[in-house]
Image: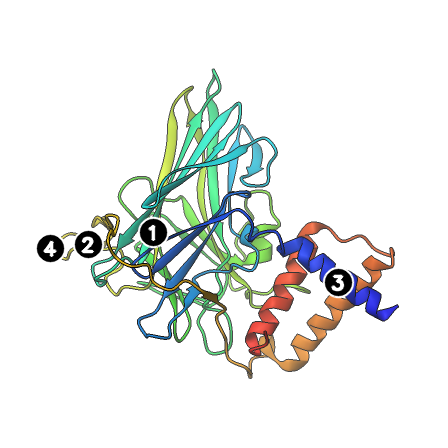
Amino acid sequence: MRPFRCFLRLCLVFFITGFHGLGAADFSQGQIKLTLHEKTGHFSLYYLGDGPESKYEALFTDQDPRSSFISLIMNDRIYRLGESSAFRIRTEGNGSRPVFIFESSFATVRETFSFIKTSGSSVTNGIRIDIAIRNRLNREATTGFRLLLDTSLGEGSGNTPFVTDRRRITAETVISGDSSDAWWVSKNGRLSLMGSIRVPGKVPDFLHFANWKRLNDIPWKTSCSEGRNFNFLPYSVGDSAVCYYYEPLPLAPGDETGCSILLASEDPNGFAASNAGIPAAARPVEVSPPESGVPPRPESASIVTLPETSDSPEYSKEADMLLLRNCIDRIDQFVAGKIFLSEEELIAMELTISRVKIRYGLP
């Protein structure tokens, strides 16, 4: 009976994650590879280091691309783009400016990706995401949205989950879009992901830095629990995320609302194209032209390895073993028909198992 249960466990994991590699399109410039998962409307982002043996490595969690997503709120109804049956998904654009289009009878959402380079980089080292929402109703609609990013680089022993150009973030935190913070960074000893807070145009109402599952499981938003760690027991330990919030506002028929969000490898100057006396938060970002005639760099993704051991109680071997046993026991009960597991819980368990494997360098 035991081998059969192991087989079913593997089938469950494959069901959760196995099909997400299908229908994916890769776009590369400089040190950045953008992967669009065309069937589900999600994206992944990778960085290629400078060494001859370098491989593309994920800048945020890519085990299950669905863990990062856009939610649209329209007239008090919430739609998770890529999963809501109300929206059809298609792609358009070219290799230097691909576009996701989510279309329904009441709204069209365009998510446009452009390659950028910051002032401290000689090659492309990031992307700009332009999100535009059009009201297709013949009446006014209150419209807002959020973007949840399942970050990972700041997790693990010795790492600070996030830093900004103004502060360290070691616990759950909310930062207003009109604060003095201009950008945030999630990093380990080798890789870094920098995200914008203030850019020209529409700024977010606020950013919520918290445990991923805590932000994933709510339909829209939750109050900030200042000082809370990045745990959400039993399956989500030391699991960081950042969520951009754009609160609902009236949108006239046929009108659009939107924003730009920038993601790149860390630059001491933030998202600055020049230092010619322009305040850092207002400096434009250089959008990279298509790099023609340049041979493609090798493309192979690899996981980010975190420290094998930790003195932190959040990352002890005993705690990790307890988490794994808990997951396996729950799956056994599910296979035996004793309990029901939602897809969200299965995804949370799968991500927990993946991150424990990463911490100890397991394949």
Label 2 neighbourhood size at 10 Å, few (<14), some (14-19), many (20+)?
A: many
Instruction: Identify the residue at horizontal 24%, vertical 57% (top origin).
Output: 118
Quarter the C terminus occupies: bottom right
Disc 1 + disc 3, Cβ < 8 Å: no
* First in residue order: circle 1 vs circle 3: 3
Q: Which residue is mark 4?
A: 276
Q: Amino acid at mark 2?
A: Ala
Task: Quote the CA–CA distance across marks 1 and 3.
Answer: 37 Å
* First in residue order: circle 4 vs circle 3: 3
Label 1 neighbourhood size at 10 Å, few (<14), some (14-19), many (20+)?
A: many
Q: Amino acid at mark 3?
A: Arg
Instruction: Identify the residue at horizontal 21%, vertical 62% (top origin).
Output: 122
Q: Amino acid at mark 4?
A: Ala
| Element carrying mark 4 | loop
Instruction: Identify the residue at horizontal 42%, vertical 72% (top origin).
Output: 188
Q: Which residue is mark 1?
A: 127
Label 3 neighbourhood size at 10 Å, few (<14), some (14-19), many (20+)?
A: some
Disc 4 + disc 3, Cβ < 8 Å: no
Label 4 neighbourhood size at 10 Å, few (<14), some (14-19), many (20+)?
A: few
Return the x and y of residue 336 as percentages of the image width and height: 87, 59
Q: Is residue 140 visible?
A: yes
Task: Quote the CA–CA distance across marks 1 and 4.
Answer: 23 Å
Say above or below: 350 vs 130.
Answer: below
Return the x and y of residue 143 as percentages of the image width and height: 47, 31
Q: Amino acid at mark 1?
A: Ile
Q: Is residue 181 visible?
A: no
Q: Which residue is mark 2?
A: 273
- Of tags 4 and 2, the one toward the viewer is 2
Instruction: Identify the residue at horizontal 46%, vertical 78% (top origin).
Output: 158
Q: Which residue is mark 3?
A: 9
